[in-house]
Amino acid sequence: MAAKEQQRQKKLAKKRSKELARKKTQAREKNRMTSFAGQFEAGLAGPIERCLVAEGLFDSPSKFGSVLVSRRMPDGRLCVVRFLIDGLCLGVKNANSFFCFPSQLNSTIESGPEDMVAVTPAAAKKMIEQAIAFAAKFDLQPAPFYAKVAAIFDGIDSSECESEFEFGRDGQPVFVTGPYDTDQRIGEIVDKLERTAGKDNYVVEYDEGYGLEDEMDGTSWSDDPELDADIDEDVVDYP
């Protein structure tokens, strides 16, 4: 009887050990999915859901606007990355990321300050790459957060897009300063332009209205099925 009891206790201990290990694994996964890094990693495993760009981004005089990319997450949400492009000088001026349900993204886009049109993933990636390459000529680096979210384009081949995008104005960088740029930042950028482009080979302008309020930050994201309407998106043919 004693031997059988010992055997039973060993089985119970083994079962408790497995249960404890399972709970620890679940806890780690839960903690991971409450962090940005964990959620972003989960998002990268999903397919591209949509790629949007501000309408006329490279045709407008300002060449300033958003490129938005989203991937589907296992729980039904979207992992969304927005790149703010300054095609005249700075390249990727800003970047941010958030997680929401499709209905919420639809609502945000429809009520946002930009008219967004659909492009291929290859075209969206090429826009970003070429914007960064243009700014790099003048020793200007993309926004720091870009490095954390660039992987949203993993698996996308930008060479599939045959279009080329034009940056600057008449081949020159044009640094447009706004009310949120400090004197120190303006001085640093002008110094780089002077050193890399050379005197009289760049332009500095001031625009009090320059900038794009980021309505995506600080928003409470909760799914509302009534907002889950299809967006009537024009598809821009960037081959």
Image (spheres, helix red, strand yellow):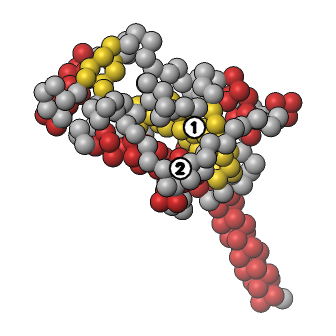
**Residue type at tag 1:** Val
Image coordinates of residue 229 in percent, x first then y, are 82, 34
The residue sitting at 29% across, 35% down in the picture is 171
Find the distance from the CA under tag 1 to the CA under tag 2.
10 Å
Report the residue marked by disc 1: 53
Disc assigned to residue 123: 2
- Residue 199 vs 36, above or below: the answer is above
Q: Relative to the observer, which residue lies in front, 59 or 134?
A: 59
The residue sitting at 25% across, 42% down in the picture is 137
Image coordinates of residue 27 in percent, x first then y, are 65, 54
Q: Is residue 133 visible?
A: yes
Q: Could you classify mark 2 by the number of other residues whose Cα lies within 10 Å: few (under 14), some (14-19), or many (20 or more)?
A: many
Image quadrant occupied by the N terminus: bottom right
Residue at the far right in the pictured view? 226
Instruction: Say whether residue 20 is left or right of residue 181.
Output: right
The residue sitting at 71% across, 27% down in the picture is 110
Image coordinates of residue 179 in percent, x first then y, are 37, 12
Picture quarter containing residue 52?
A: top right
Q: Could you classify mark 1 by the number of other residues whose Cα lies within 10 Å: few (under 14), some (14-19), or many (20 or more)?
A: many
Q: Relative to the observer, which residue lies in front, 62 or 187?
A: 62
- Residue 176 vs 208, above or below: the answer is below
Image coordinates of residue 57 in percent, x first then y, are 51, 32
**Badge 1 vs badge 2, beta-carbon distance below 8 Å:** yes
**Residue type at tag 2:** Ala
Where disc 1 sits, the SS reads strand
Instruction: Say whether residue 151 is left or right of residue 31.
Output: left
